[in-house]
Image (spheres, rainbow, N blue to C red):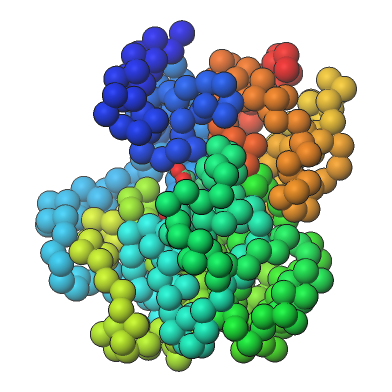
Amino acid sequence: MYEKSRQLFDIARTCIPGGVNSPVRACGNVDSFPLFIDKAKGSRLWDVDGREYVDFVLSWGPMILGHADDDVERAIMDAVRRGTSYGAPCPVELALAREVVEALPGVDMVRMVNSGTEAAMSALRLARAATGRTMLVKCIGCYHGHADPFLAAAGSGVATLAIPGTPGVPPAVVADTLLVPYNDLAAAEECFDRHGEDIACLIVEPVAANMGLVLPQEGYLEGLRRLTKANGSLLILDEVITGFRVAYGGAQKRFGIDPDLTVLGKIIGGGLPVGAFGGKRRYMEMVAPQGNMYQAGTLSGNPLAMSAGLATLQALKTKDYDALERRTAKFANELGNVLARKGVAVQTPSIASMFGIFFCPELVHNFAQVGLCDQRRFTRFYSGMRERGVYLAPSAFETGMVSFAHSDEDFERALDAAKAVDF
Ligand code: KE4
């Protein structure tokens, strides 16, 4: 089993660090190795050994329509015949920008970039330019990409690999990064009491999805909004995952939070490399060349990625998000029941088309509590599910994703696999 993947991985490790182009894919933390994927369509993946899987990773979020969606594919093919990048404005980047601005209540203007990391680092620079302050507040376990200032107590791959500290990042850089537990408003208040006048911004995942799936507790996001406003700091919502997933208008629409800046990625690229940062006009007008806060990118707004993103959003406008939320919740609850019937302490929270799997007796609300979950059990569960054709994120610090292409048969296959797995 997995022979070709093993062979390719052995070769990959000779010329790519860890054999992968992004650490969390390596599967080392779940005592395994990555599958090399041959193709994908809808809710399914096929590895290079010809084995088929129900995919609950969806490229870590972008593929909310399902893989190789016909409309998105057509848009890409039409675009590619007209050239892939001009280094000049083109109509489709304007069309995508207008779609984003229309969808997100907190976004008056938006700048396209090429990844969520680039978007978050640019939003931070803008917050610092707008306030003249340097300090950043982030939540322990939240992940905002790999730019230096965010690599303090980060989630996702940093947590997965238990990377101590932030090798290669000068202490002076993270000295301006203040850390507070997620869902702990008192800790945030104390942080602002001590540093408020020096804090440029607080950045937060409105739904934490890089420490497993941790939902915001009642009043938490509203409290952060009040706190940042009271201190003249900007609130940045990192909607790289939640944008166009927890609602078409993102978490800011779903929870009624009015951020100063918003960070986007994943879904708005439809599977091609796109990130974006946007927000209130008074701040975005500071971005070069309109203002003098410099930010740039050779491939930003390229017609191919913009076409994939626009086709994705146009398709999403026609989709029933409530129905997908109900289907995801039903699946998550049934998965939890199947596992609990095995006498296992497990929590399977969900929101919109996202679900979490925590092997612990109580629902978790922050990163410290996630650390108390049974990671060894997760490792055995992950491998058993993969052997039975169910492709989960290879980390307890990630989140399960469901697409509009997932069928009842997909959910049944996953539940049958969970019933059969010994872990
Ligand atoms: P990218 O630079 O990977 O496009 O986006 C960084 C980022 C920013 N903000 C949030 C909330 C994110 O979740 C991410 C990236 N997500 C991870 C997985 N949860 C990407 C997977 C990977 O690193 O390979």
Q: How many marks?
A: 0
Front-most of 256 and 137?
137
Quarter occupied by the C terminus: top right
Residue 379, percent from left and from top:
64, 25
Residue 323, percent from left and from top:
65, 50
Question: Considering only vertical position in the picture, is 282 above or below 158?
Answer: below
Question: Considering only vertical position in the picture, is 402 above or below 272?
Answer: above
Q: Residue at x 76, y 62 (%)?
A: 183
Q: Is residue 73 left or right of residue 35?
A: left
Front-most of 345 and 69?
345
Q: Quadrant of residue 118?
A: bottom left
Residue 406 in view of the camera: no
Residue 272, percent from left and from top:
33, 50
Q: Is residue 329 left or right of residue 391?
A: right
Question: Considering only vertical position in the picture, is 335 above or below 4?
Answer: below
Q: Residue at x 43, y 75 (%)?
A: 125
Q: Residue at x 72, y 80 (%)?
A: 194
Front-most of 384 and 73?
384
Residue 120, percent from left and from top:
46, 65
Q: Is residue 94 left or right of residue 335?
A: left
Q: Quadrant of residue 158?
A: top right
Q: Quadrant of residue 333?
A: top right
